[in-house]
Image (spheres, helix red, strand yellow):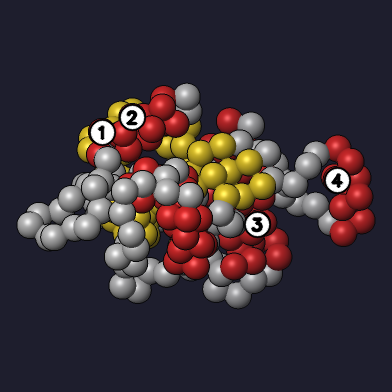
């Protein structure tokens, strides 16, 4: 499994080359695959789940031997990069052993600046929940939306294995530890995140316990 994950970029790149796709994606210095479309992402994700290289004739056999990978809340929209988790830098910042730092986007877990909020955020509880989720993971998967050469990344964090991959950003919303924040130009999971937030609000979880809708 670990070997498959570490070979993620090369496996995806090879499968795309063999398929004869135009505009073959390029693997950047950071190991991410650029220029991938939806079908490419599916192939790339299958390298993580161990379901790559199958044909229609092998579908029945695969279903009997290995279940489909489940994604929460939905399948990743961009290439994933496996990294070793180190520690939390802040309630929404995760540091990796290679020195990189990921800021979780699309969510808010603490009061920012002097902005008036009608929600009582729970940064301590959010940090504890996130730390508990990550401490049990040797490797996690980063879906980078933007970043720089210094290793500062912005995006989504995934955890799991070949049976299930879960989006940490979404899990924080689901448990009522974060609220949805829409990012200009980035709307990959807005619909899913909104539906999850609605359920958390209806069930009065976390930050929604003592408040009405904004």
Residue hosting label 1: 124
Tag of residue 63: 4
Secondary structure type for disc 3: helix
* Badge 3: residue crowd in 10 Å (few <14, some 14–19, many ≥20): many
* Residue 103 against residue 96 in the figure, above or below: below
Tell which circle, 4 or 2, labels the residue nearer the N-terminal end: 4
Secondary structure type for disc 2: helix
* Badge 2: residue crowd in 10 Å (few <14, some 14–19, many ≥20): few
- Left or right of 95: which side holds 52? right
Tell which circle, 3 or 4, labels the residue nearer the N-terminal end: 3
Image quadrant occupied by the N terminus: top right
Residue hosting label 2: 128
Give the Cα separation between the discs numbered 4 and 2. 37 Å
Q: Are marks 2 and 1 in contact (CB under 8 Å)?
A: yes
Give the Cα separation between the discs numbered 2 and 3. 34 Å
Depth check: give the residue in front, 63 or 207.
207
Mark 2, mark 3: which one is toward the viewer?
A: 2
Residue at 37% across / 43% down in the picture? 206
């Amino acid at each position: 499994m670990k070997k498959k994950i570490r070979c993620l970029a090369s496996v995806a790149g090879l499968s795309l080359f063999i398929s004869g796709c135009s505009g073959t994606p390029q693997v950047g210095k950071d190991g991410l695959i650029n220029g991938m479309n939806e079908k490419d992402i599916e192939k790339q994700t299958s390298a993580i789940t161990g379901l790559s290289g199958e044909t229609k004739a092998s579908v029945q056999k695969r279903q009997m031997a290995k279940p489909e990978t489940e994604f929460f809340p939905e399948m990743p929209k961009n290439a994933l990069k496996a990294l070793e988790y180190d520690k939390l830098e802040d309630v929404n910042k995760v540091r990796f052993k290679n020195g990189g730092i990921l800021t979780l986007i699309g969510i808010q877990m603490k009061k920012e600046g002097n902005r008036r909020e009608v929600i009582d955020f729970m940064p301590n509880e959010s940090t504890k929940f996130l730390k508990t989720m990550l401490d049990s993971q040797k490797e996690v998967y980063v879906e980078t939306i933007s970043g720089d050469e210094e290793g500062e990344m912005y995006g989504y964090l995934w955890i799991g294995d070949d049976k299930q991959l879960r989006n940490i950003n979404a899990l924080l919303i689901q448990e009522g530890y974060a609220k949805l924040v829409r990012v200009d130009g980035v709307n990959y999971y807005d619909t899913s995140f909104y539906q999850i937030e609605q359920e958390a609000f209806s069930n009065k979880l976390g930050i929604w316990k003592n408040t009405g809708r904004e």
